[in-house]
Image (tube, helix red, strand yellow):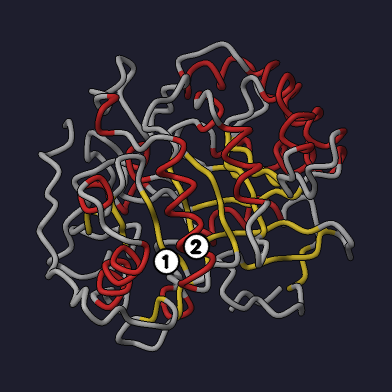
Amino acid sequence: MTRDALPDPWVRPAHPKPDVTAPGTGGLVDRHGRVATDLRVSLTDRCNLRCTYCMPPEGLDWLPKVEVLTDEEIVRLVRIGVEKLGINEVRFTGGEPLLRPGLVGIVAAATALRPRPEVSLTTNAIGLSRVAPALAAAGLDRINCSLDTVDPARFKQLTHRDRLDDVIAGLAAAQAAGLTPVKVNAVLLRGINEEDALPLLDFCLERGYELRFIEQMPLDAHHAWTRGEMVTAEDILERLTASHTLTPDVEARGSAPAERWLVDGGPATVGVIASVTRNFCGACDRTRLTADGQIRNCLFAREESDLRTAMREGATDDELADRWRIATLAKLPGHGIDDPSFLQPSRPMSAIGG
């Protein structure tokens, strides 16, 4: 087969104030011609798991409540993104978004927007068995679930919580509620769960879930990531092809980050997101809103643009849209992980949003 320590203080440099006397028009276009239409919204930095590649067992210092956007503020910014900036896909993330009390209402408000965006959720699925029907009724289209092993002992080792049964129940509830396709995202860590590649694939094949492996990225809170310890896309594919025949999916990939492979002739597929070894930045169409109202134009950005303060000081929708456009213009051509000058973002993944 051919295959082509704790976080530093969060730096939020000030961006130039837009010319509010003449609000701009158009979408979120950067200087490299890419257009952001996919919005990732972090609803909280809190999580009920302690995945080893994300945060220490004792957790992190969570954002003070006063700094976190209210439900109404989130809905307003999402509306501005959809109505004024061309956003057509909204993904709610965390931390763990199921910990947000107003989640169902936020989803309902997003799906009521016109033009209606596709609305999805990235979750660890703990508690999803209870709320899946309500999310479906609110119009949620589908879910992505993070699951790195189906072995109970290894799950506890990786997450410092004994909750695998809850995750499995949540996935089944999502599927039963019609939140499909149910997608499972897995990160393999060398010497810990790399042998789980095949069991994860078989688990998903048996249940009709779509599995995607993601290379571990330098977004851990303790900044311990090293490229040499990373399980690469090639490593993953080598393990999978030991038991399954994989052929490239000819369907156009577009801006999707995953390379997809038909499993044993299809129709089932498996995806591999080679975030580090085969970066896909040239087709990136994402913009990110953190739980405390900062716009990030890249997952690995070192700068943020503050919408929360402007919004709370009375900025109009047009003024906020202009700030968002200006933040997008500064987007770099790529994440730069391979550049000797690369610096890991100060915020860990749990505070950025997946």
For this view, does 223 lie left or right of residue 280? left
In this rendering, the answer to whether 165 lies above or below 21 is above
Most foreground residue, 253 or 134 = 134
Residue at image coords 70%, 46%: 183
Q: Residues within 10 Å of mark 1 (few under 14, many from 20)?
A: some
Residue at image coords 53%, 33%: 193
Question: Which type of secondary structure does the marked residue at label 1 adopt?
Answer: loop
In this rendering, the answer to whether 41 lies above or below 30 is above
Between the C-alphas of marks 2 and 1, the distance is 6 Å
Most foreground residue, 292 or 10 = 292
For this view, does 171 lie left or right of residue 292? right
Residue at the disc numbered 1: 277
**Image quadrant in which you'd find residue 63:** top left
In the rendered structure, which amino acid carries the disc numbered 1?
Thr
For this view, does 141 lie left or right of residue 264? left
| Residue 117: numbered disc | none
In this rendering, the answer to whether 335 lies above or below 200 is below
Question: Which type of secondary structure does the marked residue at label 2 adopt?
Answer: loop
Residue at image coords 56%, 21%: 155
Do tag 2 and tag 1 residues touch (Cβ < 8 Å)? yes
Residue at image coords 49%, 62%: 274
In this rendering, the answer to whether 185 lies above or below 85 is above
Across and down, in percent, residue 347 comes to: 24, 43
Q: Residues within 10 Å of mark 2 (few under 14, many from 20)?
A: many
Residue at the disc numbered 2: 274
Across and down, in percent, residue 257 comes to: 55, 66
Query: Where's the N terminus, which quadrant?
Result: bottom right
For this view, does 144 lie left or right of residue 23? right
State how many labels appear: 2
In the rendered structure, which amino acid carries the disc numbered 2?
Ala
